[in-house]
Image: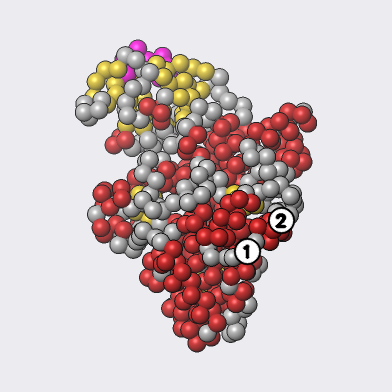
């Protein structure tokens, strides 16, 4: 049995109202349920005298509503009324709240969501003491906010130690989890706050599972799902569809008709199956760091953002830094000195966390987390590093990627209104022109076609960045002299 909750009118309206699926295991000796909403919300027995709806299990401080237990096995048969907290913070009887039994979903992705809940329990991540311990190891400076690089470092450490399974250490899934968690509070900042930690962990496990499924469907390992792969993959997963129905579903996901479904699109598709009434704005990737930090400073003071500087940017700043980085890539003495400042322990490899620290300390204008993650991923992919570290010989490639991904992110944000991270030939020519690359219209068309190998008329933003780095800073593509 699932439970439909309706009629709640508090400030968490979109989080509380909805369908709650069985959690899959007992809590406090009674059945428990979890909502299909993007932010986890739970309905369970307190273990004393109430059925409660809260943000996390056994967290009374985030209780949205409760009803007194009448000695029944589920809240749908309680006489009520429910109690909810009004805008002034006062608890009052709320006769509008209704809970009715409905059929539980048989959708495989809804069931997978329940599996993730059970995994978090099995790893002790519903235990408040264990959560506090893990948070302290993550938030080393105690400022109650953490960056993407700090989260990545935690995941690497936990999987390396065998505390978490190795498949959790998946960079595309981690980036998606980070982005979705930072959007839960509506701030659109670049940090995960302490009260969002449970949601972050849930998202890390959830998106890692989705990436496993995505990889299973993506049989040619090109990080894209074609229509043929989608049709075969859905059937392999037990989601039986006719060929025409599967083709129609694929075209619905592939809204721009590029002929391929990316991981982020697949995630949106799955979320639509689980929670079809969601806010579509939530599924737009965060791409701009221009206003991040406003809310986090308001909540935590300047100390919170002392190592997460966000600056207004202009083309002149990028041009000046571009010349400096090109000169550095051509000068062995400079590149060796800079590498030593990054690889401070001298082990000839660096992690994402070390790169993040290096950028914060040396290149204020490049401190943009989505760009940093893409630059890091592109470096280890191009250099075929399978240990998730950037090696000494890859440093020039990393440095160039850090710069150009940041510069091109900033430029592209000026024209990419739909934030889809895809580029038409018109956007391609615009970015080349503004970035100072002088080329004829015919030459630009020709270059675009070289990148657009499938002739779909659209290239991925990451593909454009790789093309631009190779064109503008070829010295970065050569290996560092000392291996």
Query: Who comes first in sequence, dot 2 or dot 1?
Result: 1
Residue drawn at x 38%, y 66% is 364
Q: Nearer the viewer, residue 158 or 359?
A: 359
**Which quarter of the figure is the C terminus placed in?**
bottom right
Q: How many marks can you see?
A: 2
Q: Nearer the viewer, residue 331 or 45?
A: 331
Bounds of the magenta span? 73-82
Residue drawn at x 60%, y 55% is 428
Q: Secondary structure at mark 1?
A: loop
Foreground tag (2 vs 1): 1
Q: Nearer the viewer, residue 302 or 271?
A: 302
> Residue 288 appears at what percent x and percent y?
44, 51
- For the residues labelled 2 and 1, the Cα–Cα distance comes to 15 Å
Q: Crowding near pointer 1: few (<14 within 10 Å), some, many (20+)?
A: few
Residue drawn at x 39%, y 60% is 313
- On whether residue 473 falls in the magenta region, the answer is no
| Residue with the mark numbered 2 | 449
> Residue 330 appears at what percent x and percent y?
55, 82
- On whether residue 81 falls in the magenta region, the answer is yes
| Residue with the mark numbered 1 | 439
Instruction: Give the vertical position of 295 relative to 392 (above or below).
Output: above
Q: Is residue 249 visible?
A: yes
């Amino acid at each position: 049995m699932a439970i439909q909750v309706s009629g709640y009118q508090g400030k968490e309206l979109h989080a509380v109202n909805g369908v709650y699926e069985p959690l899959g295991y007992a809590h406090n000796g009674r059945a428990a349920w979890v909502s299909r909403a993007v932010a986890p919300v739970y309905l369970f027995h307190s273990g004393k005298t109430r059925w409660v709806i809260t943000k996390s299990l056994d967290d009374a401080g985030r209780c949205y509503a409760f009803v007194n237990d009448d000695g029944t096995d589920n809240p749908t048969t309680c006489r009520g009324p429910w109690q909810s907290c009004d805008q002034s913070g006062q608890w009052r009887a709320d006769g509008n709240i209704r809970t009715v039994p409905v059929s539980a979903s048989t959708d495989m992705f809804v069931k997978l969501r329940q599996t993730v809940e059970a995994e978090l329990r099995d790893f002790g991540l519903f235990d408040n003491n264990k959560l506090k311990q893990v948070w302290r190891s993550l938030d080393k400076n105690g400022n109650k906010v953490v960056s993407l690089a700090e989260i990545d470092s935690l995941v690497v450490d936990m999987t390396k130690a065998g505390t978490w399974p190795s498949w959790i250490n998946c960079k595309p899934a981690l980036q998606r989890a980070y982005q979705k968690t930072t959007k839960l509070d509506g701030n659109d900042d670049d940090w995960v706050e302490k009260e969002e930690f449970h949601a972050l962990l849930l998202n890390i496990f959830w998106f890692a599972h989705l990436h496993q499924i995505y990889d299973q469907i993506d049989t040619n390992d090109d990080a894209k799902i074609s229509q043929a792969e989608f049709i075969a993959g859905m059937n392999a997963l037990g989601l039986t569809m006719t060929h025409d129905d599967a083709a129609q579903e694929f075209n619905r996901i592939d809204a721009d008709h590029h002929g391929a479904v990316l991981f982020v699109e697949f995630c949106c598709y799955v979320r639509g199956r689980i929670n079809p009434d969601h806010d579509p704005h939530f599924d737009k990737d965060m791409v701009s760091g221009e206003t991040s930090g406003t809310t986090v400073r308001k909540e935590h003071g300047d100390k919170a953002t002392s190592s997460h500087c966000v600056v207004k940017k202009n083309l002149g700043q990028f041009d000046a830094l571009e010349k400096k980085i090109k000169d550095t890539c051509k000068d062995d003495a400079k590149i060796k000195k800079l590498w030593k400042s990054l690889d401070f322990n001298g082990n000839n490899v660096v992690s994402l966390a070390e790169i993040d620290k290096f950028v914060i300390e040396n290149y204020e204008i490049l401190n943009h987390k989505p760009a940093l993650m893409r630059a890091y991923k592109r470096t280890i992919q191009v250099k075929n590093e399978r240990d998730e570290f950037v090696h000494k010989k890859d440093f020039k490639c990393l440095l160039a990627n850090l710069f150009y991904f940041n510069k091109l992110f900033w430029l592209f944000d000026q024209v990419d209104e739909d934030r889809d991270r895809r580029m038409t030939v018109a956007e391609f020519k615009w970015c080349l022109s503004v970035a100072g690359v002088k080329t004829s219209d015919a030459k630009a068309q020709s270059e675009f076609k070289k990148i657009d190998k499938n002739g779909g008329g659209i290239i991925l933003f990451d593909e454009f960045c790789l093309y631009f780095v190779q064109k503008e800073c070829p010295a970065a593509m050569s290996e560092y002299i000392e291996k």
